[in-house]
């Protein structure tokens, strides 16, 4: 029976559940893609909340096997008690690395931006090298990067430079800041161009504030200080934007860092305020549509597509706005392929000792993609796209690519 | 985000409500706060096992039992949902299970008594094919088979308890244990690990032959923990049973429940394939009510609150399991209307000293109107377009009376119908 009304209680946005909130129900272990694929992984429950109870300051308990957590966050997505399982694992892994040191490979992979900058500056050479068996053999021996893992192609003209050179469209009803991320900047400038074109087509001015790597490669490679440094720079710059400027990200994981992890995992001051202004590009466009402001002047795009929802998109807690958007386009036949994690998890599947595991995790998805035989597999996350192309031999694209085609910007 | 009808929850009630909406061609969004309660429960459908909390005599005919319960207790959630909702909802679920590839048996007409992992009989009327041979109304002797190193099912305990309550003679209930090929017993493993292994043909065959070697006599049936495959693929069960050479039945284990996992994973996927959008990882709270209508609820999404504007809402919440209701020292508070749910406000009165007795906290929840709207206890709705289903409805103990599944179906179905009409 309901009786008296009580005042607003403190249970506001994203109240972090303490470790005691874990009821040991094992739900996380049942969905963990790594635990599903290898017996040597002890699972998120043990490595997260259970071990956390025994980790005390200042001595960090270095638990074996933490590096096998790929960081997909499906454990947190499924936890009925909203325990930050993966954050416990990341913090412990980071403490362990701070005490014992990290490998050259993890240091390098944590500095993806540096690596990409170098790759971009030397683009034709770097791309040639990345496809040279001898170079790849050496990379595997020296850096621990698996020789079978296709590495992304670098482009000499970065998105940043492309953007500054283009004429500016300033007659707009509103302005957004685009957090393009390292991928768009160094590897897939075209996606950034499409994002800008789509937003401008909808009467929105795009500005591009100076930005740093979002920091997620550093987080998952046990280098949280570096991630905090990167995040701090981004928060400082994004905080300086006028209050009515929303921030748009086209990479699922960059967006999640800005929205959530800066404030909750990295404790960056001011990050919470920035996080409330960050939108995934498809989330933002769908919002425009609901407000009656999305330009629906689409050309038909006759194509059969599969949509793979990236694990980190599930963590956004916004549903699948890309699917809703694409269903507005005449001619698009879109189905979801719901086979769980693709296995690559950013830099995880690049590593020599984890490549096979990453391919095993993705095997169910690859089989479903091959069986469906569609024109392309769409995924909002760039490493998911890399993995699907590699594992299933299918063409993969960001959902924005289809939207751009419908607007005639293909 | 705007939608026609928003369903909040991930248990059986939420699934039945969503399926009802989807079958009627309505645009439903399923908001999923965390893993389904089906992972923790037996995942058979119990409609009515005991007519009240005092009796030990199981109900034989659940449908007739519910009809009597409704006549005797006009305020019981079953009475408010109505017998028709139970019937129609059950038909909908059975058809859905079939369409999704499940082999289930049973009906509302008759309860089976199925053995639990501790050897007690549990009345249930809808169950997977793989559990049917456990029916205690049949006479064949039972061999409980455990697996060495798997401590979540103790065959000796099940056997000793069952032989006391059910025993049909000296040799009627026995316990054996077989070792599992390739399992290092120094390591802890769960039902999930076993279920994954049982999907492997060679593994299954080897375990079956080890069981066969342990059983010398004919015409027995073998009860094993419910770990025969992680997916709903019934081939795992039937080929294993054929190789054991005796009738085999699965017994639900301690969480995580493989039976529940099979059910939830498949039904979730099936309903997504039919076009229902699912929002993961987003606990819902805060109903914004004006003029007696709920205008919006909020999801705790990454970074900010994500508004959901629906025409109607089905709140198919669990009780305490998924954290939908928050218990403090003096109050239990609901997250949508910020009302105190006043049942057994003192913590010491919320629980019974005996773990195995009915627990008062089980009946904490929302008071509802005769249309399943949340109410302030005076029969008036807090919001006309919000409808409740499942465990968070006040005034009944789904565990004690073994009626969790039936109530989820009846209230889930009825709430969906009301939401469509709202």
Image (cartoon, coloured by chain):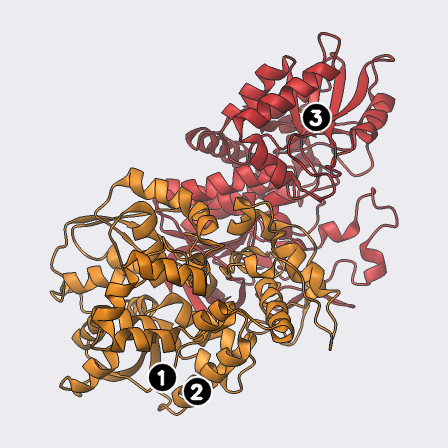
Chain colours: A orange, B red
Task: Describe residue B277's horizontal placement relative to residue B405 as left or right.
Answer: left
Which quadrant does the N terminus of chain A fall into? bottom right
Observer-nearest residue: A83 or A100? A100
Q: Is the residue A51 above or below the residue A179 in the image?
A: above
The reply to whether dot 1 and dot 2 touch (C-beta < 8 Å) is yes
Q: Which residue is mark 3?
A: B114
The residues bearing labels 3 and 2 have C-alpha atoms spaced at a distance of 62 Å
Q: Position of residue B369 (x, y in %)?
A: 59, 53
Co-location on one chain, circles 3 and 2: no
Q: Position of residue B74 (x, y in %)?
A: 66, 42
Observer-nearest residue: A288 or B412? A288
Q: Position of residue A97 (x, y in %)?
A: 60, 71
Number of numbered discs visible in the structure rendering: 3
Q: Going by the picture, which residue comes out furthest to the top?
A: B218
Q: Which residue is mark 1?
A: A211
Q: Secondary structure at mark 1?
A: loop
Q: Is the residue B125 above or below the residue A6 in the image?
A: above
Q: Which residue is mark 2?
A: A233
Which quadrant does the C terminus of chain A fall into? bottom left
């Amino acid at each position: 029976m309901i009786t008296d009304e009580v005042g607003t209680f403190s249970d506001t946005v994203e109240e972090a559940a303490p470790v005691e909130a874990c009821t040991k129900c094992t739900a996380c272990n049942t969905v963990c893609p790594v635990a599903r694929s290898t017996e040597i992984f002890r699972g998120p429950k043990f490595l997260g909340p259970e071990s956390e109870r025994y980790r005390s300051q200042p001595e960090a308990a270095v638990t074996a096997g933490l590096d096998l957590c790929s960081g997909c966050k499906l454990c947190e997505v499924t936890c009925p008690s909203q325990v930050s399982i993966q954050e416990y694992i990341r913090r412990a892994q980071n403490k362990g690395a701070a005490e014992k040191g990290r490998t050259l490979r993890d240091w390098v992979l944590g500095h993806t931006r540096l690596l990409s900058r170098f790759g971009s500056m030397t683009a034709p050479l770097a791309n040639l090298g990345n496809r040279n068996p001898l170079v790849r053999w050496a990379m595997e021996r020296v850096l621990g990067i698996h020789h079978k893992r296709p590495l992304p192609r670098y482009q000499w003209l970065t998105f940043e430079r492309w953007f500054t050179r283009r004429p500016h469209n300033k007659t707009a009803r509103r302005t957004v800041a685009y957090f393009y991320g390292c991928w768009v900047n160094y590897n897939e400038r075209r996606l950034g161009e499409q994002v800008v074109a789509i937003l401008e087509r909808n009467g929105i001015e795009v500005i591009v504030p100076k930005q740093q790597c979002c920091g997620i490669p550093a987080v998952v490679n046990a280098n949280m200080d570096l991630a905090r440094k990167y995040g701090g720079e981004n928060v400082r710059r994004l905080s300086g934007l006028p209050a009515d400027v929303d921030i748009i990200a086209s990479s699922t994981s960059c967006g999640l860092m800005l929205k959530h992890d800066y404030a909750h995992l990295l404790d960056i001051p001011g990050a919470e305020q920035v996080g409330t202004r960050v939108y995934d590009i498809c989330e933002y466009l769908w919002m425009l549509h609901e407000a009656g402001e999305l330009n629906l002047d689409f050309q038909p795009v006759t194509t059969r597509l599969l949509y793979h929802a990236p694990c980190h998109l599930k963590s956004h807690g916004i549903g699948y706005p890309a699917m809703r958007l694409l269903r507005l386009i005449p001619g698009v036949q879109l189905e979801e392929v719901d086979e769980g994690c693709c296995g690559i998890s950013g830099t995880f599947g690049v590593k020599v000792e984890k490549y096979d595991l990453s391919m095993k995790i993705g095997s169910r998805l690859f089989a479903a993609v091959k069986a469906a035989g569609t024109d392309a597999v769409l995924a909002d996350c760039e490493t998911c796209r890399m993995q699907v192309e590699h594992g299933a031999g299918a063409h993969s694209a960001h959902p924005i690519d289809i939207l751009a085609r419908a607007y005639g910007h293909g | 985000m705007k939608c026609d009808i928003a369903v909040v929850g991930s248990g059986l009630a939420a699934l039945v409500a969503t399926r009802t909406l989807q079958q009627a061609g309505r645009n439903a969004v399923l908001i999923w706060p965390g893993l389904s309660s089906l992972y923790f429960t037996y995942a058979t459908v119990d409609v009515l096992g005991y007519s009240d909390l005092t009796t030990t005599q199981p109900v034989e005919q659940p449908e007739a039992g519910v009809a009597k319960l409704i006549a005797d207790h006009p305020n019981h959630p079953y009475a408010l949902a109505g017998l028709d909702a139970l019937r129609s909802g059950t038909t909908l679920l059975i058809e859905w299970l079939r369409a999704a590839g499940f082999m289930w048996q049973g009906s509302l007409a008759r309860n089976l008594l199925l053995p639990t992992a501790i050897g007690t009989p549990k009345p249930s009327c809808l169950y997977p094919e793989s559990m049917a041979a456990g029916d205690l109304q049949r006479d064949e002797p039972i061999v409980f088979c455990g697996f060495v190193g798997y401590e979540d099912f103790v065959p000796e305990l099940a056997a000793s308890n069952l032989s006391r309550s059910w025993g049909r003679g000296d040799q009627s209930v026995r316990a054996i244990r077989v070792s599992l090929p390739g399992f290092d017993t120094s390591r802890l493993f769960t039902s999930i690990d076993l279920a994954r292994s049982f999907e492997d043909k060679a593994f299954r065959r080897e375990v079956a032959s080890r069981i066969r070697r342990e059983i010398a006599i004919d015409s027995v049936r073998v009860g094993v923990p419910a770990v025969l495959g992680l997916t709903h693929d019934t081939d795992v069960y039937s080929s294993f049973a054929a190789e054991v050479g005796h009738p085999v039945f699965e017994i639900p284990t301690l969480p995580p429940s493989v039976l529940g996992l099979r059910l939830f994973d498949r039904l979730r996927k099936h309903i997504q394939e039919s076009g229902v959008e699912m929002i993961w990882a987003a606990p819902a709270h805060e109903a914004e009510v004006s003029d007696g209508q709920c205008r919006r609820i909020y999801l705790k999404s990454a970074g900010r609150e994500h508004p959901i504007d629906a025409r109607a809402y089905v709140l198919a919440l669990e009780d305490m399991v998924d954290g939908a209701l928050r218990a403090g020292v003096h109050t239990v508070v609901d997250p949508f209307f910020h009302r105190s749910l006043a049942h057994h406000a003192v913590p010491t009165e919320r629980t019974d000293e005996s773990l195995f007795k009915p627990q008062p906290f089980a009946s904490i929840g929302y008071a509802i109107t005769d249309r399943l709207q949340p109410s302030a206890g005076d029969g008036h709705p807090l919001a006309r377009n919000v409808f409740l289903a499942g465990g968070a409805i006040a005034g009944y103990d789904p565990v004690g009376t073994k009626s969790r599944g039936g109530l989820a179906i009846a209230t889930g179905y009825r709430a969906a119908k009301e939401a469509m009409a709202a």
